[in-house]
């Protein structure tokens, strides 16, 4: 991951927040297809809910203040935690498209990719449908989450992920991550036991090692 902005940065893709607040940014990548915004938190303690609220607010503030081209570029957001995250925080993250990377869980984007690349053979058709529909949806950019909210508040059909069912849907995603993710990890360990080491080695050489 080649960062265009690193820890301590005050902008995302060279755009400042609309409010004028000097938000600190831990990492940003920028490409024509998408922008990624990274938050790195608490290597030894659980992430408090306020940290997720602040991270989500930063994204909204930067998006509101961005130039048109940046505003149209999908913004994918990731929160990396060295400690496990509470379920309530996971539900909130899913509802806003924030992808959490934490110990002992296969991150949602990797779960979707693993199934797309062949791990579907270890799952039932119903489990594949959950990955295709729910897990894919949970990895959406910030702009898509805002579009859903706008559609819901404007009574436009299609925004079924909002409203009273929002929490239930988020729980379905997290249940899939825990249950299907465990099955997929077992599959990878059996059939591609070096997959993580290979990915790390490729990245290591890509960034030039030490």
Image (cartoon, rainbow, N blue to C red):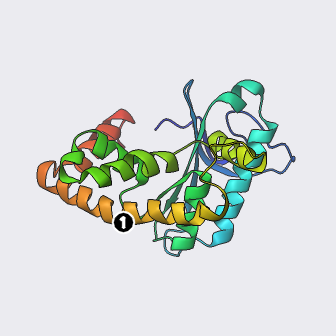
Indicate the position of residue 189 as horizontal and vertical percent values: 17, 56
Q: Where is residue 68 in the image (x, y as percent from the top left)?
A: 76, 26
Residue 111 visible in rendering: yes
The relative height of residue 170 versus residue 150 in the rendered view (above or below) is: below
Q: Is residue 125 left or right of residue 99?
A: left
Q: Nearer the viewer, residue 102 or 74?
A: 74
Q: How many marks?
A: 1
Residue 110 visible to the viewer: no
**Secondary element at image label 1:** helix
Q: Name the residue under label 1.
A: 178
Picture residue at 63% right of the left edge, 41% below the top: 144
Does 36 sit above or below residue 126? above
Q: Where is residue 150 in the image (x, y as percent from the top left)?
A: 74, 45
What quarter of the picture does the C terminus occupy? top left
Q: Residue at x 29, y 37 (%)?
A: 202
- Residue 142 lies left or right of residue 82; in this view the side is right
**In the image, is 200 to the left or to the right of 74?**
left
In which image quadrant can residue 40 be found? bottom right
Out of 170 and 108, give the one closest to the viewer.
Answer: 170
- Residue lying at the far left in this picture: please name it: 190
Q: Name the residue at 32% across, 65% down.
A: 179
Local crowd size for mark 1, using a 10 Å CA cut-off: few (<14), some (14–19), many (≥20):
some
Percent position (x, y) of residue 14?
72, 33
Of 49 and 172, which appears nearest the observer?
Answer: 172
Report the residue at 54% width, 26% height from top: 33
Q: In this view, does 51 lie above or below 118?
A: below
């Amino acid at each position: 991951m080649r960062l265009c902005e690193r820890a301590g940065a005050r902008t995302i893709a060279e755009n400042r927040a609309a409010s004028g607040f000097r938000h600190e940014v831990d990492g940003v990548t920028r490409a024509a297809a998408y922008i990624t915004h990274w938050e790195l938190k608490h290597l030894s303690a659980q992430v408090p809910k306020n940290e997720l609220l602040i991270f989500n607010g930063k994204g909204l503030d930067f998006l509101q203040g961005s130039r048109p081209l940046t505003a149209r570029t999908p913004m994918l957001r990731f929160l990396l935690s060295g400690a496990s995250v509470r379920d309530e925080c996971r539900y909130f993250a899913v509802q806003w498209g924030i992808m959490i990377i934490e110990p002992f869980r296969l991150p949602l984007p990797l779960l979707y990719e693993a199934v797309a690349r062949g791990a579907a053979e270890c799952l039932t058709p119903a489990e594949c449908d959950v990955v295709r529909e729910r897990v894919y949806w949970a990895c959406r950019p910030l702009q898509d989450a805002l579009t859903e909210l706008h559609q819901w508040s404007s009574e436009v059909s299609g925004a079924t992920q909002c409203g009273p069912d929002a929490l239930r849907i988020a729980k379905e995603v997290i249940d899939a991550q825990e249950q299907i993710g465990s099955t997929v990890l077992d599959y990878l360990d059996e059939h591609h036991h070096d997959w993580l080491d290979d990915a790390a080695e490729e990245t290591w050489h890509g960034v030039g090692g030490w």
